[in-house]
Image: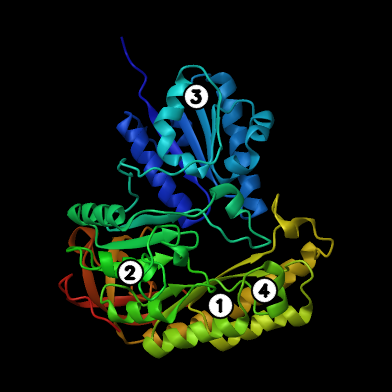
């Protein structure tokens, strides 16, 4: 008697938080005896981990689902799962739209996948979108990299930005304890990982839901304290964190990043708009002047630090003059990378029902103009790397050129240089930069440094 192999395929949409959730769910499935399938049509369990930040990402999910739902009509043993933010947002409505689905589960239920699948395999169609307290997860994620790893430190978000659906789909802020985070980092180090990225939808809020107050009157547990707490784990050579919120970004945190050798000089701090009236309408809780002061402070402590951000154009009511304030901010700050998007109305958000929506033509025009400026400024920022020696943590072979390996500088700039991954993987290599582009670099290795000699800038 032959047994049909149990194979799974996960397609992940959206942010780093979703990627981290997918790794955890892949780990659960492999513990259950499933094997990864590169081809979704060869898998008998399909999981879409979804994003609802932009409408186009949501519509892409439905397109994928349509193909697999049709396949399930011919192969009833196919298990179809929608996880993540679209699942949380749509809930039962998703089952009505795609009745072939077996499981609809919100992001707070990622570590309950095995229990939920047990219900599915017992013949039930399951919806798991109720708010829950996220228990400490003892599963081992199936990491997509053997060199760098995500480490969730806080789930959810308490902000109420008028354009953002995240608080509705990811729930309230829930911080993990420093001790639990340290254990995970130590485990990653024992497995040979060299770099970790601490993750949170609003990572600067880390610890404010944990008990304790210092004699100075601040929260006992903060992101700054966490960086000091995990910094000295042997084997971990680089530490990053994302995503930051300007409302909570402090000089104390900046000073810690400058002092701690392993914390990389790269900051991802979305500003969303360069106009104060638009920021107020977005309920962001800061001004463009405050944002500029944050960047000035970072550059005072770390002059060469790389700055990346997110920006939205075409928010309801945005005038041409207000949009030009965003262009002015981008021009004057000079970002190494800027993720841009045209405003997309999302269900359940205040701005989605405002009457002063802009036309798609206006939004597309402004997005094109902003992206043009972003490319120019990123190219200008790249020039500082020409002929410099950078430390590159090698992650993999260049998929487009088998004669090259690729990795990232401390400033998070993707860098390619000649080599074989069997020699360089997981190593911090000194690379002389010989070619610069807007968003990547090419160089040549000059001497391989010891992983413990990671220089600070």
Q: CA distance from mark 2 to mark 4?
A: 29 Å
Q: CA distance from mark 1 to mark 3?
A: 44 Å
- Indicate the quadrant containing the N terminus: top left, top right, bottom left or bottom right: top left
Return the residue found at the far right.
355
Return the residue found at the far front.
215
Q: Residue at x 33, y 81 (%)?
A: 258
Q: Is residue 262 above or below residue 422?
A: below
| Depth check, front residue: 269 or 293 | 293
Q: Return the disc, 3 or 2, that comes first in the chain's sequence.
A: 3
For label 4, the crowd category at 10 Å Cα-Cα, with few meaning under 14, some 14 to 19 and many 20 or more, is many
> Badge 2 is on which residue?
225
Q: Residue at x 23, y 68 (%)?
A: 237
Q: CA distance from mark 3 to mark 2?
A: 47 Å
Q: CA distance from mark 4 to mark 1?
A: 24 Å
> Badge 3 is on which residue?
78
Q: CA distance from mark 1 to mark 2?
A: 36 Å
Circle 3 — which element? loop
Comparing marks 4 and 1, which lies closer to the viewer? Answer: 4
Instruction: Tell me where residue 416 appears, x and y as whole percent.
Output: 34, 70
Q: Return the disc, 1 or 3, that comes first in the chain's sequence.
A: 3
Comparing marks 1 and 3, which lies closer to the viewer? Answer: 3
> Badge 4 is on which residue?
279
The reply to whether callout 1 and callout 2 are in contact (CB within 8 Å) is no
Circle 4 — which element? helix
> Badge 1 is on which residue?
375
Comparing marks 3 and 2, which lies closer to the viewer? Answer: 2
For label 3, the crowd category at 10 Å Cα-Cα, with few meaning under 14, some 14 to 19 and many 20 or more, is many
On the picture, is 449 further left or further right than 246?
left
Circle 2 — which element? helix
For label 1, the crowd category at 10 Å Cα-Cα, with few meaning under 14, some 14 to 19 and many 20 or more, is some
Q: Return the disc, 3 or 4, that comes first in the chain's sequence.
A: 3
Figure quadrant of residue 261: bottom left
């Amino acid at each position: 008697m032959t047994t049909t192999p149990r194979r799974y395929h996960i397609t992940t949409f959206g942010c780093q938080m979703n990627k981290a959730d997918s790794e955890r769910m892949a780990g659960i499935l492999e513990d259950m005896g499933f094997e990864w399938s590169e081809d979704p049509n060869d898998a008998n369990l399909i999981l879409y981990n979804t994003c609802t930040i932009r409408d186009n990402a949501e519509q892409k999910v439905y397109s994928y689902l349509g193909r697999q739902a049709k396949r399930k009509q011919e192969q009833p043993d196919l298990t179809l799962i929608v996880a993540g933010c679209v699942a949380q947002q749509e809930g039962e409505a998703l089952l009505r739209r795609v009745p072939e689905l077996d499981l609809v589960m919100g992001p707070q239920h990622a570590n309950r996948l095995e229990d939920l699948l047990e219900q599915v395999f017992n013949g039930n169609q399951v919806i798991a979108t109720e708010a829950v307290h996220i228990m400490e997860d003892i599963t081992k994620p199936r990491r997509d990299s053997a060199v760098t790893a995500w480490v969730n430190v806080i789930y959810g978000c308490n902000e109420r930005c008028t354009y953002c659906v995240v608080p509705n789909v990811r729930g309230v802020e829930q911080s993990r304890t420093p001790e639990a985070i340290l254990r995970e980092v130590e485990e990653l180090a024992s497995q040979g990982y060299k770099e970790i990225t601490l993750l949170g939808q609003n990572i600067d809020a880390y610890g404010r839901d944990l008990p304790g107050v210092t004699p100075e009157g601040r929260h006992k547990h903060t992101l700054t304290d966490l960086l000091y707490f995990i910094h000295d784990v042997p084997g971990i050579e680089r530490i990053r964190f994302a995503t930051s919120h300007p409302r909570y970004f402090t000089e104390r945190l900046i000073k810690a990043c400058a002092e701690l050798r392993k914390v990389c000089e790269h900051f991802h701090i979305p500003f969303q708009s360069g106009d104060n009236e638009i920021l107020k309408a977005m309920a962001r809780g800061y001004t463009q002047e405050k944002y500029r002061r944050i960047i000035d402070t970072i550059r005072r402590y770390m002059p060469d630090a790389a700055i990346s951000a997110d920006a939205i154009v075409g928010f309801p009511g945005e005038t041409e003059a207000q949009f030009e304030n965003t262009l002015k901010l981008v021009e004057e700050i000079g970002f190494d990378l800027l993720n841009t998007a045209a405003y997309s109305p999302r269900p359940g958000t205040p701005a989605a029902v405002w009457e002063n929506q802009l036309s798609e033509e206006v939004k597309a025009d402004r997005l094109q103009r902003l992206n043009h400026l972003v490319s120019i400024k990123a190219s200008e920022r790249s020039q500082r790397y020409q002929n410099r020696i950078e430390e590159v943590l090698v992650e993999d072979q260049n998929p487009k050129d088998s004669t090259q390996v690729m990795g990232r500088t401390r400033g998070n700039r993707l860098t390619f240089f000649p080599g074989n991954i069997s020699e360089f993987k997981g190593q911090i290599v000194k690379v002389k930069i010989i070619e610069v582009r807007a968003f990547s670099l090419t160089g040549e290795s000059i001497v391989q440094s010891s992983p413990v000699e990671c220089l600070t800038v």
